[in-house]
Amino acid sequence: MAQSTTFRQVRRLAHQLAQVQRRGFAASPRRSKATAAEAASYLLDTFAEKSVVRRQLIDANQLQKLALTLGQTSIQGADVSDVPPAAGTLVPQGYHLAYFTPNGTEKDLGADGTDRTFNASAPFTRRMWAGGRMEWPGGAVLRVGDEVEERTRLLSATAKKSRSAGEMVLVEVEKEFWGPAGLALVDRRSWVFRPEIDPQNAPAAPKPLEDVTRGPSSIKDLSDKGDGFATRELRWSPAGLFRFSALTFNGHMIHYNENWTQNVESHPSLVVHGPLNLINLLNYWKDIHGYGQGPGSISYRAMSPLYAGQTYHIRTADVRDTDKDKVWEVLVERDGVVCMKSEIGS
């Protein structure tokens, strides 16, 4: 049985890992920093067989602020423009991402502003949310006013290498959310850690985007193109991205610091959050296919970044029957490029 660990204890482990990051991983007298394989091994040795447990009240104010950030003024028919949702209100699928946010002070963050819990050792400190899977077992749900327990464990840490990006570490964690009625959600997340960037030797900033629209964030449905399914058009403003970062306590500067984003990480503009697109995928399915009800599962993978001011779409690419249920392939696309792909089961 995995050892149960409080979040304070895992922060202590993360602090020890951060010390390794700062002084370099002494793998041998000839090398001062870890290879991807060594970084992955150290992460497994540090967090193996440990289950991190946190408890939190599902607060109505947080749910209200997330809904408003998403352009929603009601939840399950109740107006939340001025008044938070009532106790007992069901938390929509994916909205748990605004809860159980990272702890720690600013000095505990990485150079790019990211939380360093479960991070690989230096130089593999640039974290990107690559994909994952969520499952709602059925029966148990999360509601406003519930005391919920989050149980997190490290599933894997694997060294990878590609021609374009070089060495990296793929990390997978699993989070279970237990409410008063039992297990309500299993949330598996995949993160990729790439080598850190020296701001003094960063590549030249890319050319600023030209095909962007200024103004507030926008979400609207377009009529179907003959396949029977509506397409959803979206655009996120810098203000919308900042509000989502604040709600999820996400300090990653690529979402709100344009100077860092362009001049250090070489993105042409602020990056739309992967979890934000994940929530939008779930909302699209619920509205178009679920008739107001959420799905049973979603598997997803980030493919290409989207930026503030860009207009993009969510659409249904395929529907098929399996032995257990029906599965919808739902894509986030921009100008024919798939930015996030998902399979959603009923």
Image: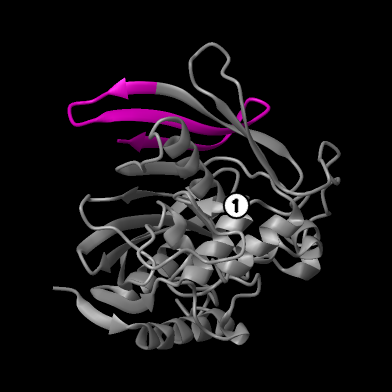
- Residue type at mark 1: give it: Leu
Q: Identify the image quadrant of residue 186.
A: bottom left
Q: From the viewer's perspective, is residue 12 above or below residue 34?
A: below
Q: How is the image coloured?
A: one colour
Residue 341 shown in magenta = yes
Per the image, the residue denoted by label 1 is 70
Please state which of residues 297 and 334 is positioned toward the viewer in this rendering. 297
Q: Position of residue 293 (x, y in %)?
A: 36, 41
Q: From the viewer's perspective, is residue 278 above or below residue 248?
A: above
| Residue 310 appears left or right of 19 | right
| Residue 310 appears left or right of 147 | right
Please state which of residues 125 and 289 is positioned toward the viewer in this rendering. 289
Q: Secondary structure at mark 1?
A: loop
Q: Residue furthest left?
A: 1
Is there any visible trace of residue 155 in the rendered image?
A: no
Q: Residue at x 48, y 72 (%)?
A: 101
Q: From the viewer's perspective, is residue 22 above or below residue 72?
A: below
Q: Position of residue 96 (x, y in %)?
A: 42, 61
Q: Quadrant of the C terminus?
A: top left
| Residue 90 appears left or right of 182 | right
The majority secondary structure of the magenta stretch comes to: strand
Q: Residue at x 52, y 66 (%)?
A: 84
Please state which of residues 314 and 13 is positioned toward the viewer in this rendering. 314
Q: Residue furthest top?
A: 226
Please state which of residues 110 and 23 is positioned toward the viewer in this rendering. 110
Q: Which residues are magenta?
A: 319-346
Q: Position of residue 149 (x, y in %)?
A: 30, 73
Residue 272 shown in magenta = no
